[in-house]
Amino acid sequence: MDSQSRSKLYSRRSTKTPLAWYPPVIRRALHTIGQLNPQARLYFLVLVGMSSVVDGVYNVLLNLYLLRLDYGTEFIGLVNAVGLLTFGCASLPAGILGARYSNTLLMKSGGALSVAGGLLLPQVQLLPPGLREGSLVILFAMILTGFSFFFVNSAPYLINVVDPEHKHLAFSLNTAHWALASFGGSLLGGVLPGLFADLQATTLADAAPYRLTLTLAGFVMAFALLLLLRLRPLPVDSQLAKADAAAAPADTRVWTAAFVSLIAIMTLIRLFQVAGSATVLVFFNVYMDRQLAISTAAIGAIAAVGRLTGVPTALLTPALIKRVGIVKVVLWSSLLTSVFLLPMAMIEHWLAAAIGFIGALAVMSVRFTAMTVFILDLVPKVQQSIMAGSGETAAGLSFAIMSLGGGILLSFFGFRELFLLGALLSFIGALLFWLYAQSAKTKRALKPEL
């Protein structure tokens, strides 16, 4: 499809010129947002609503809520592991169904499932102890299953509604919105329990303030779902759809041997590549609360700053790709994840932990943005949803393994060994990606993106 056809169908060009005193990265981002079609901008609003809860509020509060319910690290690891495992297992079917039916249909279905789980999970505290444990596991798995349906199909949706020349910047904006939403959610997750505790004349040692905060977060997701329901797919009889059909290759097979091999290679790479980020995201709040006795508000503030740093790093990713190539961007951001885990492992102090956490999340935004575009560019449009699903399957499995394995490891060793293991696994992921790039199995694996 050519850029002119896509622009006519999708875009409403902005006639406003960004303020000259804005930094170049911000000016270009604002200009691109103005050029995106209304449906793409609506998608970004939905992403903010969903991510602020799943990757913001829940990232800060779920483990602390479970601690206040008197559960130990093994059960916390189990809840996270089952949820993340279902995220991974649902991701590939989500991609297959998105390719077979509609990316927007799967996004809406996933949003509804996440909202149902998000509204019900905080109320588990009201159940008898015998029913509480299973309900916590099932409902968190429901939230992440729905989020996987939404998240997997959002990447192929976005890449096909923006002009090709805006591809890298659109995905950097995608990651920036995600990071900014997670920042806001993390900040609220750290502050709101204290406010609810004051209103209820209780303390943060009680579970009630956390339950109220998580309940409010469920209503935020419900509002995002209302926006998501307004998202429209590309009409099948549109000029752009006809142009795509005309340009399609004669061989329309999806599951070729080369494609299956590519999925296997990328899955292995991402399984190791994501392990360091998984370790940080799952156990950072437990480490700060249990090992260092840091307050909930401080944990939320540090988590929020970590998410916020992902905004400028995501916006800088297109410039980095243009300068050094997408392969080097993915490689160095993966290696830096390992580096930032070292202060968390070697220095038992809240400042060292904060530096490691913030740094790891900053480079994670770069790696995620670049890696998403990298894997989608390896395959034609008909295979992009499946490719995105396989990538998130690997990420979900990595999170699940580190959650369950980390909880068990902590019962025998300590946080130092856990963070060192995460650093080692991420280094292996970077090494595997470098070996794949050097093998030159595809020309696009080594070609710098312009």
Image (spheres, rainbow, N blue to C red):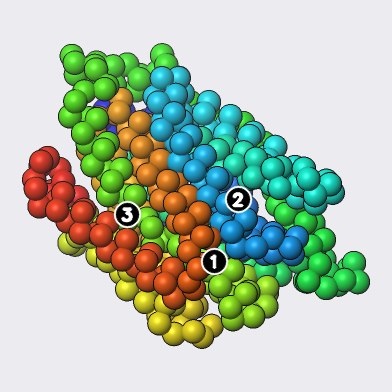
- Between circles 2 and 1, the one closer to the viewer is 1
The label shown at residue 272 is 3
Q: Amino acid at mark 3?
A: Phe
Residue 214 sits in quarter = bottom right
Check residue 5 in the rendering and tell me which mark sits there, or answer none.
Answer: none
Tag 1 or tag 2, which sits nearer the N-term? Answer: 2
Residue 278 visible in the picture: yes
Residue 197 to residue 270: above or below = below
What amino acid type should be assigned to the residue bearing mark 1? Ser
Q: Residue furthest front?
A: 412
Residue 44 rendering spot, x and y as whole percentages: 51, 46
Secondary structure, mark 1, is helix
Q: Tell me if I can see residue 322 in this picture.
A: no
Q: Residue furthest right?
A: 201
Q: Position of residue 285 (x, y in %)?
A: 58, 68
Split into 4 quadrants, where in the image is the N terminus? top left
Q: Which residue is mark 2?
A: 79
User: Regarding mark 3 in the picture, which secondary structure is present there?
Assistant: helix
Q: Tell me what residue is drawn at x 51 percent, y 47 percent.
A: 84
- The CA distance from mark 2 to mark 3 is 21 Å
Residue at the spot of label 1: 411
